[in-house]
Image (spheres, rainbow, N blue to C red):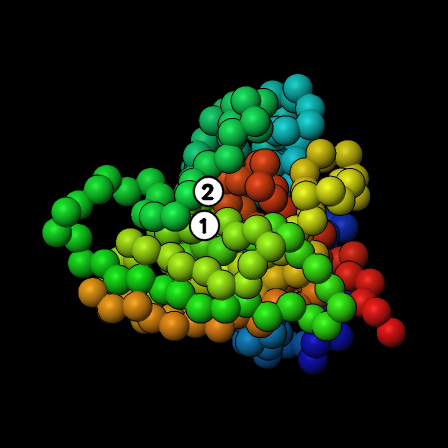
Amino acid sequence: MNEAVERVVDYLYEQYDQPITLADMADVAILSQFHFARTFREVTGVSPGRFLSAIRLQRAKGLLTTTELTVTDISYMVGYNSLGTFTSRFTKSVGVTPIQYRGFAQADLAVGTSTGAAGRPPEDDAAVGAMAGWMSLPPGTEAPLMYIGVFDGPIPQRLPVACTTVENDTAFQLDGVPEGQWYIFAAAVNPDEAPIDGYGARVARLVAREGPVHSVRGQTTMVDLRLRPCSPIDPPLLLALPVVLDRYDARQPVATPA
């Protein structure tokens, strides 16, 4: 079934600017709509519609940072027929408006890259806990800069509720994580690696995702993150971090030692 899902993901990357229905995707997978939708979610962790939306918004992020096209033009180029719908979905998913995101990239700002609750007003009596643990890398690989964030769903989007960056280390600590169920996402990048395309962004080649993980008030939840090479079926990154790592190219695998 992974092959069918990968075939659909390739189709979505190629045709994201066109109207695409669930029936279209099921035809590519050669499955019934019901079976396809269930299989796609089981394999990727998200619905086909959310995956398509993530691809479109990822492409929009790239166009915002590398061109002077208007937001209206970009919205149509990535498959939206309504500027209002595009702006609303971009803001909800990325955490900032398209104009704000373009401004962050131009000003060389990274949003929410320090440990703690991002985008939330401080509350002295907040019901928060902490998460800590270690990251393991594939044998023979190096990743001097790693980003770890806590998100409310399986797609890394909006501002994380807590996040940090770690350099040349595999231990991490995330404070100020509100009580509840969360997903932890980690991505490893090489700051010296040249961008693979014209977007000018660092590229994450190793990722890890765990969740849902329960945060308990006043306690530290231990989590081990096992990083692996990006897969074609990994949903695109949508968080507003244009400098730390704007996105990763899941379809260009890491070269691992023999």
Q: Residues within 10 Å of mark 1 (few under 14, many from 20)?
A: many
Please give left or right for residue 130 compared with residue 113 in the image: left
Q: For mark 1, what is the residue?
A: 164
> What residue is rendered at 84% in x and 69% in y?
257
Q: Secondary structure at mark 1?
A: strand
x, y percent for residue 90: 49, 39
Does label 2 or label 1 sit earlier along the sequence? 2
x, y percent for residue 18: 69, 45
Q: Residue furthest right?
A: 258
Location of residue 242 by image quarter: top right
Label 2, label 1: how far apart the Cα atoms are: 6 Å
x, y percent for residue 111: 46, 36
Q: For mark 2, what is the residue?
A: 113
Instruction: Inspect the image, locate mark 1, and give the three-letter code of the amino acid beneath it.
Output: Thr
Q: Secondary structure at mark 2?
A: loop
Viewer-nearest residue: 31 or 256: 256
Q: Marks 2 and 1: CB-CB under 8 Å?
A: yes
Please give left or right for residue 123 compared with residue 86 in the image: left
User: Does residue 224 lie above or below 18 as drawn?
Assistant: below
Q: Residues within 10 Å of mark 2 (few under 14, many from 20)?
A: many
